[in-house]
Amino acid sequence: MPWNPNQYHKFQAERSAPFEDLLKLVEPRSNITAADLGCGTGELTLHLADLIPDSQVTGIDLSPQMLEKAQKLERPGLRFLSGDQSDLGGNWDLIFSNAALQWSEDHPTLISNLFNLLNPGGQIVVQVPSNHKHISQRLIAETAQEEPFRTYLNSYVRISPVLPIDDYATLFYHLGAENIIVFEKIYGHVLENAAAVLEWVSGTVLVPYFERLGVHKDSFLAVLRKKFEKNMPGNPVFYPFRRTFFSARKRSR
C-alpha cells in the first residue's frame, strides 16, 4: 500500500502513546536479536533499540516511503530492511510490533508462525488497533458498499483480522507460552471536530481504499465527511480508540 508518512504523523503524539505502553511489556535484556515488524519511519524502533543495548535490531517494513526515512536512522546494531511481516524468517530473541500486524490476515496462523521463530526464552510483544467497531470504521464499510463506490472498489471492504483478547490468550496457552499478558486499553483522544477524525483515519484505515479508488478518492471522502459530521457532531469530538496488547515468552529448554 502507498503509505504517506506525513499523513500518518499528523497525530504523532496520539499514536506514540500506545507505543510507550507497549515498550513497558518488553523484558529489558542486552545482547539479543530483535525484529520490529512494521517499523514505519523508524523513530520508535530507535527507542526500542535504546532499551536493549548491545543488541542487533532489525526494523522491517514494506513501504518504500517509510523505509526511506527510517534508513537515515541506521547505526551499528540498528538496520532497516524491506520485507513482509507475515513472511518473517530466521530466529529471534524478541519479535516486536506496534500497530502493524492488523494488516496481515489469519492471526491464529500468523501469531503461531511468529512465536515459533523465537529462540528459547524469547519474547513476542505486540500492539494492534482494535477499533473496528467504532462508528468511523462502520461508516467507512457502509459507504464502501454503496454505489458507485461498490463498483469502483470491486466490492472490496476491509475486515479487521484482529481477534478478541480471549482468543490471543488461548492461542498462546496452546503454544506452550509462559508469562502471557493480553489486555485492551482505550485511549481517549480529543480531536477538533469530525473532520479531524477523518484526517486520522485517512492515514491508516482508509489507505487501502484510497489505493483502489484512484481518481474517485475525493468523492468518497466527500460522502464520508458528511456522514462523519452527522454522526460525530460537536467541537471538539471525543474519539475513543481501542487497542489490543499481548506479550508472551517462549519457554527455555
Image (cartoon, rainbow, N blue to C red):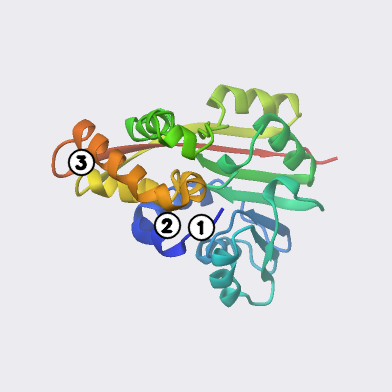
Which residue, given by chain and number where applicable, does mark 2 sit on?
8
Q: CA distance from mark 2 to mark 1?
A: 8 Å
Q: Amino acid at mark 1?
A: Trp
Give the left or right position of residue 239, taking residue 99 as reference. left
Q: Amino acid at mark 2?
A: Tyr
Q: Please name the residue shown 73% across and 63% down the image.
A: 31
Question: Height in image: 3 above or below 179?
Answer: below
User: Residue 201, how many percent across, how many down?
Assistant: 38, 46
**Above or below, 169 relative to 30:** above
| Residue at the image point whose x is 37% and y is 32% from the top | 143
Q: Residue 60 versus residue 221: which sits nearer the camera? A: 221
The circle drawn on residue 3 is 1
Which quadrant of the structure image shows residue 61? bottom right
Element type where label 1 sits in the image: loop
Residue sitting at x 73%, y 32%: 109
Give me the C-alpha separation between circle 2 and circle 3.
19 Å
Q: Is residue 115 above or below residue 196?
A: above
Say which residue label 3 marks.
237
Which comes before the other along the chain, label 1 or label 3?
A: 1
Judge depth for marks 1 and 3 and give the one in front.
1
**Total marks in image:** 3
Query: Could you tell me the amino acid type at mark 3?
Result: Val
Q: Crowdedness of circle 1 by 10 Å Cα count: few (<14), some, many (20+)?
A: some
Q: Nearer the viewer, residue 23 or 194?
A: 194
Q: Decide which of tag 2 and tag 1 comes sooner along the chain.
A: 1
Locate residue 163, reporting x and y percent. Answer: 57, 27
Q: Is residue 99 visible?
A: yes
Circles 2 and 1 in contact, beta carbons < 8 Å: yes
* Callout 2 secondary element: helix
State if disc 3 and disc 2 touch (CB < 8 Å). no
